[in-house]
Amino acid sequence: MQVRGMSKPVVVFSLLALAATVGGCKKQVAATTPAPAPAPAAAPTVTLNATPSSIQSGQTSTLSWSSTNATDLDIEPGVGKVSPQGSTPVTPGQSTTYTITATGSGGSATASAQVTVSAPAAAAAPPAAQPNLSDLFSQNVKDAFFDFDKSELRQDARDALTKDAEFLRSYPNARISIEGHCDERGSTEYNLGLGQRRAEAAKNFLISLGITSDRLTTVSWGKERPFCTEHSEECWAQNRRAHLVLVQSNGSGQ
């Protein structure tokens, strides 16, 4: 570049002006701001409830749950993978704590619910059937036995009739027939008379113990209705008796 004919100060000034012009035309570059870091993923939440929480063995409870920010949910024991919210029935055989685990990009969360199982209540036993008067009479009233060809009461006959009177006093509405019986020996006519005397002896003894006569009737069957039909003394002894029979009762009689 030719700078002849110009003074040195002018040359210096010209060079400075040129440098300023070139510098002013240079493009300005803005400072770069770094991008913000991404926000952390939200942590999952989960709830679990059991309704009812107490059951008897064999009954069913319902598990209900809900969650947020979870992509995978699992209920143990025995249920497995489930949706983010829902319910399912369970029938545990014993008291069980169920736990749900919810997992998402923000971590995991758990919740639990217990189902208490108790043994089924024992079934109430049906009320025992109350024996009727006829059954009670058969269980408690005994016959009076006699010696051969006798109508006098033996001691064992008195003891039996004494207990019979206690029962009849407890059931004042009960009325009885006293049957006189004999063994097969002797004539029919004779045994009918003997049977009647035996029935009357039992009746009179009961009256002496406080049983009113209007509750007692007598009849003789002689040897016509034997209790045992073998031809032996053991069998004949069973037939010589005053046999008490319930013939009427009004209500329970107690």
Image (spheres, rainbow, N blue to C red):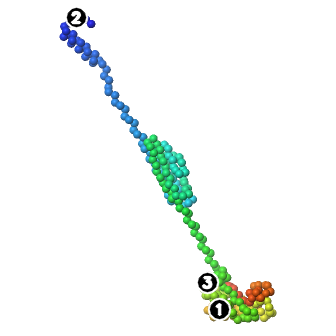
* Between discs 2 and 1, the one toward the N terminus: 2
Q: Which residue is at 78% across, 94% downward?
A: 190
Q: Which residue is mark 1?
A: 206
Q: Which residue is mark 2?
A: 4
Real-space Cα distance between discs 3 and 2? 162 Å
- Element at badge 1? helix
Res 181 → quadrant: bottom right
Q: Amino acid at mark 1?
A: Leu
Rendered-image quadrant of the C terminus: bottom right
Residue 181 is at least partly visible in this image: no
Q: In this rendering, would 95 be left or right of 191?
A: left
Real-space Cα distance between discs 2 and 1? 177 Å
The vertical placement of 104 against 97, above or below, is above
* Residue 117 horizontal/vertical position (percent): 53, 59
Determine contact: label 2, label 1, CB under 8 Å: no
Q: Which residue is at 61% across, 84% downward?
A: 253
Q: Which mark is residue 253?
A: 3
- Element at badge 2? loop
Q: Which residue is at 61% across, 74% downward?
A: 128
Q: Amino acid at mark 2?
A: Arg
